[in-house]
Image: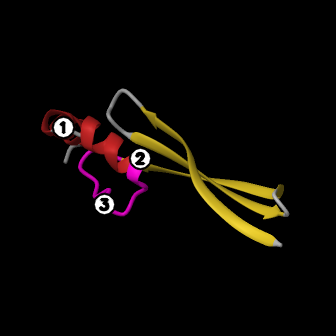
C-alpha cells in the first residue's frame, strides 16, 4: 500500500525573528520510505501564520512580539 506523508520536520528561528520551516514529503510503501522530498519556506515577523502547522504557529506566537515585528519592518524599510 502506498501512502503520502507530510510532516514539518525542522523549524528554526534566526536572529531577525524569521522562522524557517522545512516540510518533508515521504512516499511510503508498506511502512518503508521509497521516496522523499523537502520544501522550505519562511514566516517573517508580521506575516499571517494562521494556516501553518500548530508547532509553527506556537513558535511564531512566542517569537513574533510587537517589538520583533517593528524591528523587522524597520530593517526592511516597511
- Residue 3 vs 32, above or below: the answer is below
Q: Marks 2/1: CA distance?
A: 17 Å
- In the displayed structure, does residue 18 sit left or right of residue 21? left
User: Dot 3 corresponds to which residue?
Assistant: 50
Residue at far top of view: 15
Q: Which residue is drawn at 40% across and 47% down?
A: 56
Label 3 close to label 1 by CB (< 8 Å) = no
Which labelled disc corresponds to residue 39? none
Mark closest to the chain's N terminus, 3 or 1: 3
**SS for dot 2:** helix
- Residue 39 vs 15, above or below: the answer is below
Label 2 Cα crowd, 10 Å radius (few <14 / some 14-19 / many 20+)? few
Span highlighted in magenta in the image: 44-55
- In the displayed structure, does residue 18 sit left or right of residue 32? left
Would you identify the image quadrant in which residue 28 lies? bottom right
**SS for dot 1:** loop
- In the displayed structure, does residue 1 sit left or right of residue 18? right
**Does the magenta segment cover residue 61?**
no
Q: Marks 2/3: CA distance?
A: 11 Å
Which labelled disc corresponds to residue 55? 2
Would you identify the image quadrant in which residue 49 lies? bottom left
Residue at far bottom of view: 1
Label 1 Cα crowd, 10 Å radius (few <14 / some 14-19 / many 20+)? some
Mark closest to the chain's N terminus, 2 or 3: 3
Which labelled disc corresponds to residue 65? 1
Amino acid at each position: 500500500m502506498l501512502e503520502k506523508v507530510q510532516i514539518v520536520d525542522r523549524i528554526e528561528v534566526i536572529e531577525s525573528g524569521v522562522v524557517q520551516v522545512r516540510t518533508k514529503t515521504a512516499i511510503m510503501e508498506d511502512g518503508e520510505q521509497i521516496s522523499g522530498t523537502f520544501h522550505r519556506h519562511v514566516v517573517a515577523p508580521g506575516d499571517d501564520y494562521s494556516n501553518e502547522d500548530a508547532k509553527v504557529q506556537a513558535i511564531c506566537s512566542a517569537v513574533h512580539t510587537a517589538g520583533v515585528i517593528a524591528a523587522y519592518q524597520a530593517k526592511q524599510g516597511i
